[in-house]
């Protein structure tokens, strides 16, 4: 087994880095159930092999997700190799009698001083190697291994690491929620076919095909999950206390510029709680939009929107 050398951007080894550690988080695609029955994890720290462990379906704990903790003890980098097998009858240490791995993942990651970071190792069905029935993954040569169906170098830089959190298995990063992205941010806007910032003046309600009257609501957000997030809109008239019933959506966000993602074309009907549309015309409305993602993170924004005293009636209604 061989690995690449450390990068010049590695943090310096120091006695002050004794408390640093990496958590290797091993995950598997649902499609691997019934195929991967065991895997051998080998950790090598600064070129010296430190541990070799075998996880199997015969263990009392599930194969996925699994955490493997690697303390730094003053070291600079950890090299991690996972070899997965389609049988539980594998030795903890390599043996000539062992079957060939059905897939292999290799990563080479830095320790960061006095910090705990997460390294995700996700096993994917498209990386099952040739020679196994139904496999179509490539055969890679270390230090490369298969990710997304192709061979890549597993060397990671400090910025590639995620802050460790106990719910990491349910909070994978995506296009709208990158690793270490920071706090959630939500910006309220308007728009039927795209996101637009709120205008300075009043916004007209539009009559809908079922007879109700709605605002077109849009939003931009970052550091919340792209898919599966719940978007909730509420409103209250600041002078009278009149409220608009909550409306919620579960739509996938589109990527937008500046690291943001956006959602638009949300119909927010004001007169669906019994109050007539005339109660809202010519008056301000405090609208709050909140996004809650599947990992428990959330962000919200509130804006006071002056409602115009006239209504848009589309042609044909």
Image (spheres, rainbow, N blue to C red):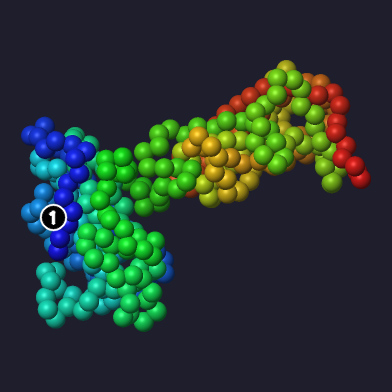
Front position in the image: 166 or 188: 188
In this view, which residue lies farthest toward the right?
A: 316
Local secondary structure at mark 1: strand
Quarter occupied by the N terminus: bottom left
Decide if residue 248 is in sight here: yes
**Which of the 4 image quarters holds residue 196?**
top right
Taking 48 as reference, is 130 above or below it? Answer: below
Residue at point 14% right, 81% down? 97
Decide if residue 24 is in sight here: no
| Residue placed under numbered mark 1 in the picture | 44
Quarter occupied by the C terminus: top right
Taking 221 as reference, is 63 above or below it? Answer: below
Is 262 on the left-hand or right-hand side of 110?
right
Residue at point 28% right, 56% down? 153
The location of residue 81, given as percent across then percent down, is 21, 60
Residue at point 40% right, 34% down? 182
Residues packed near mark 1 inside 10 Å, few (<14), some (14 to 19) or many (20 plus): some
Q: How many marks?
A: 1
The location of residue 197, given as percent across then percent down, is 65, 28
Front position in the image: 227 or 195: 195
Front position in the image: 242 or 227: 227
**Which of the 4 image quarters holds residue 75?**
top left
Front position in the image: 210 or 114: 114
In this view, which residue lies farthest toward the top?
A: 239
Taking 249 as reference, is 196 above or below it? Answer: above
The location of residue 236, given as percent across then percent down, is 69, 27
The location of residue 293, given as percent across then percent down, is 50, 44
Residue at point 24% right, 66% down? 141
Is 283 on the left-hand or right-hand side of 238?
right
């Amino acid at each position: 087994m061989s690995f690449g050398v450390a990068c010049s951007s590695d943090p310096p080894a120091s006695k002050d880095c004794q408390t640093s550690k990496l958590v290797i988080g091993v995950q598997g695609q649902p499609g691997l159930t019934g195929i991967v029955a065991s895997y051998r994890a080998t950790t090598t720290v600064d070129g010296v092999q430190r541990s070799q462990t075998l996880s199997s379906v015969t263990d009392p704990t599930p194969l996925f997700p699994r955490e493997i903790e690697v303390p730094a003890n003053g070291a600079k980098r950890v090299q991690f190799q996972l070899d997965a097998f389609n049988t539980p009858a594998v030795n903890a240490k390599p043996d000539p009698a062992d079957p060939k791995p059905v897939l292999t993942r290799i990563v080479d990651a830095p320790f960061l001083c006095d910090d705990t970071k997460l390294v995700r190792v996700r096993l994917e069905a498209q990386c099952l190697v040739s020679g196994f029935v139904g496999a179509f993954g490539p055969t890679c040569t270390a230090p490369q291994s298969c990710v997304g169906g192709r061979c890549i170098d597993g060397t990671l830089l400090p910025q590639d690491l995620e802050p460790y959190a106990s719910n990491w298995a349910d909070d994978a990063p995506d296009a709208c929620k990158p690793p270490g992205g920071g706090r959630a941010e939500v910006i309220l806007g308007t728009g039927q076919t795209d996101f637009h910032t709120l205008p300075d003046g009043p916004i007209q309600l539009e009559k809908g095909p079922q007879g109700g009257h709605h605002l077109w609501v849009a939003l931009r957000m970052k550091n919340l999950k792209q898919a599966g997030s719940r978007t909730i809109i509420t409103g209250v008239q600041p002078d009278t206390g009149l409220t608009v019933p909550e409306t919620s959506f579960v739509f996938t966000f589109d990527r937008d510029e500046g690291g943001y993602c956006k959602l638009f074309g949300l119909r927010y009907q004001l007169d669906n709680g019994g109050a007539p549309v005339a109660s809202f015309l010519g008056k301000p409305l405090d609208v709050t939009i909140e996004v809650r993602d599947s990992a428990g993170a959330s962000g919200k924004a509130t804006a006071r929107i002056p409602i115009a005293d006239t209504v848009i009636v589309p042609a044909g209604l």
